[in-house]
Image (spheres, rainbow, N blue to C red):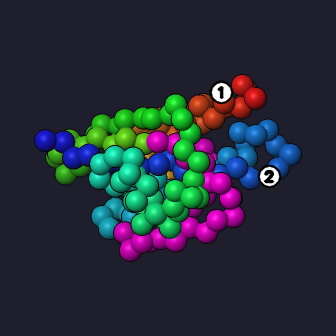
Amino acid sequence: MALRACGFIVFRRLASCAPPTDNIQYLLLQTSYGQHHWTPPKGEDDLTTALRETKEEAGLGAEDLQIMEGFLKELHYEVRGRPKEVLYWLAELRDPGTEVTLSNEHQSYRWVQLEDACTLAQHKEMQDTLRAAHRYLEAQQDKQ
């Protein structure tokens, strides 16, 4: 049976004169275990879990996030020889100045632009998901 996890690709928009999608930064957390990999916050099973885990791992609650309707990505990969699937929703941080508070599962966090997020994420599936989120946000911006 596949392991399952769910989480959010959390982003914030910074005020700037640059084009709107150039002002987007993504939140990545660095694990305090294993190879100290970087990922968005995630947990076990569904949207409720994704909200709970994001609160637990990054200190960001449902009141801090605006979930973007229409974006959901499913990743499939192996962890220690077992298949794993992860669902990611996209959520905007309502107040870009909100502080991140890490759990003991993570040792660091960064707000980074797309290409830096992809460099930190390292895994192709996560990089593809971050790029898909960015394309989604660009398409939403074009509609406005």
Comparing 36 with 14, the one in front is 14
Total label count? 2
Instruction: Name the kind of residue labelled 2 in the image.
Output: Ala
**Crowd band around label 1 with a 10 angstrom C-alpha radius: few (<14), some (14–19), many (20+):** few
- Quarter of the image for the N terminus: give it: top left
Quadrant in the picture for the C terminus: top right
**Can you give x and y, in whole percent of width and height, for residue 52 in the image?**
40, 59
Q: Is residue 95 left or right of residue 85?
A: right
- 48 versus 124 height, above or below: below
Residue 40 located within the stretch drawn in magenta: no
Q: At x 65% / y 54%, what residue is drawn? A: 94
The span shown in magenta is 89-118
Q: Does the magenta run of residues contain 110?
A: yes
Q: Name the residue under label 1.
A: 139
The secondary element bearing badge 2 is classed as loop
Disc 1 secondary structure class: helix
The type of residue carrying mark 1 is Ala
Residue 68: image x %, image y %?
56, 39
The residue labelled by disc 2 is 15
